[in-house]
Amino acid sequence: MERVLLIIQIIISITLVTIILMQVRGQGQSLFGSAEGGYRTRRGLEKSLFQLTVILMVVFLAISMIVVRVF
């Protein structure tokens, strides 16, 4: 059980890193901010990636808590 949770956690962490890097690269800006000062809404693929990031973060944290609590 412990091994399965750890493998799932590794897969989720690699997926999270990939998705976050895709979001940063897709914005066409540096890591420290944007040249434009306006507010932008997320649409299409960018919105889906953002929502997937939030879901994966919640799942990752839940698995982390389970691993710490159980083992």
Image (spheres, helix red, strand yellow):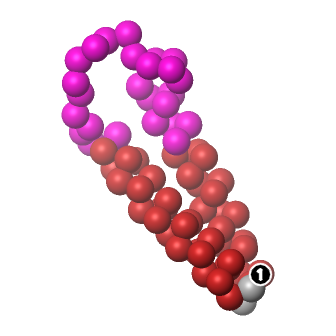
Residue at coordinates 30% horizontally, 45% vertically from top-left?
A: 47
Horizontal relation, residue 13 to residue 26: left or right: right
Q: Nearer the viewer, residue 28 or 54?
A: 54
The quadrant of the rendering that contains the C terminus is bottom right
Magenta stretch: includes residue 12: no
Q: Main secondary structure of the magenta part?
A: loop
Residue at position x 60%, y 62% from top?
12
Residue 66: % across, % down: 61, 81
Mark 1, secondary structure of its residue: helix
Residue that carries the numbered disc 1 in the rendered image: 3
Give the magenta range.
20-46
Say what amino acid the circle numbered 1 marks: Arg
Decide which of 58, 68 is in the foreground and name it: 68
Task: Identify the residue at the far front of this view.
Answer: 69
| Horizontal side, residue 62 vs residue 3: left or right | left
Image coords of residue 3 (percent x, y): 77, 81
Quarter of the figure with residue 69: bottom right
Task: Report the front residue among 37 and 44.
Answer: 37
Q: How many labels does the image show?
A: 1
Residue found farthest to the top: 35
Q: Residue 43 sits in which quadrant?
A: top left
Residue at 67%, 79% (x, y): give it.
67
Q: In which quarter of the image is the N terminus?
A: bottom right
Q: Residue at x 31, y 12 (%)?
A: 36
Report x, y in % for residue 24: 49, 31
Q: Is residue 20 above or below residue 7?
A: above
Along the horizontal axis of the image, is 60 left or right of 51? Answer: right
Q: Quadrant of residue 10?
A: bottom right
